[in-house]
Amino acid sequence: MHYDVIIIGAGMSGLAAGIRLAYFDRRVCIVEKHYAFGGLNSYYRIDGREYDVGLHAVTNYAPPERRSAPLAKLLRQLRLTREDFALCEQRFSEIRFPDCRLRFSNDIALLKEEVAERFPGDADNFLRLVSEIEAYDDTRLDRTYQAARPILRERLDDPMLIEMLLCPIMFYGSAEEHDMDFTQFVTMFKSLYLEGFARPREGVRRIIKAIVKKFRANGGEIRMRTGVDALQVCGERVVGVTLESGETLTSDVVISSAGYVETMRLCGDGAWQSETEEIGRISYVESIAVLDKTPAELGHDATIVFFNDAQRFNYARPDELVDLTSGIVCCPNNYTGHEELSEGVFRLTWLANHERWMGLDEEAYATQKRACLQRFFECGRRFLPDLKQHVVCTDMFTPRTIHRYTGHLNGAVYGSPHKRKDGRTPLANLFICGTDQGFLGIIGAMLSGITIANLHILSKS
Amino acid sequence: MVDQQVKDIILGIISVVAPDADLSDVKSDVKLRDQLEMDSMDFLDIVMELRKRYKLEVPKEDYPKLATLDGCVEYLGPKLEAMAAV
Ligand SMILES: Cc1cc2nc3c(=O)[nH]c(=O)nc-3n(C[C@H](O)[C@H](O)[C@H](O)COP(=O)(O)OP(=O)(O)OC[C@H]3O[C@@H](n4cnc5c(N)ncnc54)[C@H](O)[C@@H]3O)c2cc1C
């Protein structure tokens, strides 16, 4: 079979790129290794209960009147309506450090007030920083790397405020350990603090079903359980893909959402391979408890809490299996309009060491998961004192799960620290979209697919 | 082709490309981008819709000619006319 475009991966970015290309009459085929759509943000069912793989928050939430916000752009580009995603806004979220808490919501005014109260010396500095970020054009694809921490130290006096602001931002979108690129910081600051959090009542499946349906309605073809085994390279061009079944598909262009290093490894003989240090190291363990009451009934109102038990926030791959000193707590019930969810859900996420988790044999893996669950109950008590009494059932995923279901090396949630903003690779007609292109999160990944399809295919006649 | 027909074609495309835009009072001689708060992505979409619907290619260097509704009439009118005649 010959296509105009083959897209590797039916995650957020691949599907969004596919919708654009199919809409504009390209013959396009998405090939997906897994049996489920969604990639890093998929969903599943156990014992009749629906779970999301990772969804805490759809970041980048913006109300309809903010027409130039990423969410609005994305809906226009995909010819979708706000109703297709049915997003409900968060109540409020919180950053908890020793002896200091900052609350924020989808209205930046709350964070400004909280900063002014807890860090009076930095109140004006923070307002200036927010203005600077608002005016900063982070969508340009040609900016070079600048470390964020030194810039923030110039702007703000209290080191703890810097740590507190960085904590959610790094947790939700830094592929790099310890520090991050300032432009990436700005993008994330906008998506978390200036825009905000929302969630569809049905979870991520609402979004995935909407985009799969749109792609098919536009005439696109998807092949599931169809892993790409190799890219066929001829000179400096890719001419097609060999599937795990041995079948070959050819195309004029290939767009891959499998990750940069992962994609170049598919190109065979090593000539196109890059350095191993480009593989990301950030991965997570997440424990999920289903409860017989809602977290609010048990006294916990916050939608998301980012906690850190030291003065400094150490964002890095831990030496141990998990890093218990910081984490994220998410309660989907604490979104507005989620009142009628029948059960309570409590999710807790820690940084994890992929290598350590991969090194365990099956028995040790099961033992460690149980041990992890024990710690989850202990840590969860800080937020819901009676957590354990109300648990109906639990589930958990580890870096091993992420690797298995998405093929991302190291189970790296945010991909490689080296982003390729223009999506180019050494091969003239092979492009990268999604995580390793550099727009992160659910909305970011979809915008990434759109951007790459527009830039390299649709704007060429 | 009558001027109004070309305008209707463009406004019809904009209602698909940017359904959240208010098209009730679009001025013919003011830049579409400015009055409708459209960005470069939206603008590119108009060009692509023209290609999709009318098989009409607008080369990059001619994009500025589509900035206003009047510009669209002047630039696209004859082209759409020629196509309709085929
Ligand atoms: C645990 C977790 C929680 C998260 N929580 C949130 C959140 O709350 N909010 C938010 O906005 N973002 C969240 N994210 C981030 C968000 O999910 C990602 O940024 C986004 O889904 C990335 O999409 P993508 O299309 O770039 O990549 P992916 O989703 O990884 O898509 C790549 C696809 O390619 C397929 N593939 C790989 N190799 C091959 C091959 N050889 N052949 C065929 N197919 C292949 C994979 O199976 C996969 O489906 C979370 C991520 C994780 C892992």
Image (spheres, rainbow, N blue to C red):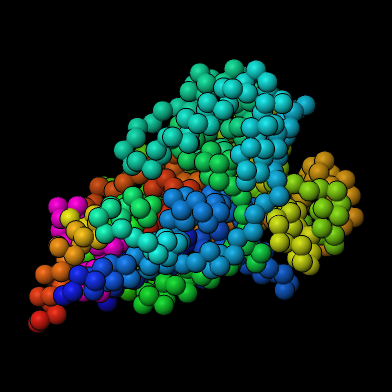
Taking the image as shown, residue A162 lies to the left or right of residue A29, namely right
Up-down: is A389 above or below A169? below
Q: Residue at x 55, y 41 (%)?
A: A194
Q: Position of residue A197 (x, y in %)?
A: 61, 50
Q: Which residues lie in the magenta part?
A: B44-64
Quadrant of the frame with the C terminus of chain A? bottom left
Q: Give the quarter of the image for residue A335.
A: bottom right
Q: Position of residue A115 (x, y in %)?
A: 66, 28
Residue A412 visible in the shown view = no
Give yes or no for residue B54 being in the magenta stretch.
yes
Q: Tell which of A8 and A341 is nearer to you.
A: A341
Q: Residue at x 71, y 50 (%)?
A: A91
Q: Position of residue B31 (x, y in %)?
A: 28, 52
Residue A152 visible in the shown view = yes
What secondary structure characterizes most of the magenta part? helix
Q: Tell which of A64 and A262 is nearer to you.
A: A64
Up-down: is A97 above or below A27? above
Give yes or no for residue B13 being in the magenta stretch.
no
Q: Position of residue B70 (x, y in %)?
A: 21, 60
Q: Tell which of B10 and A222 is nearer to you.
A: B10
Q: Residue at x 56, y 67 (%)?
A: A83
Q: Give the quarter of the image for residue A192.
A: top right
Taking the image as shown, residue A160 lies to the left or right of residue A236, namely right
Quadrant of the frame with the N terminus of chain A? bottom left
Looking at this view, name the residue that lies furthest to the bottom: B86
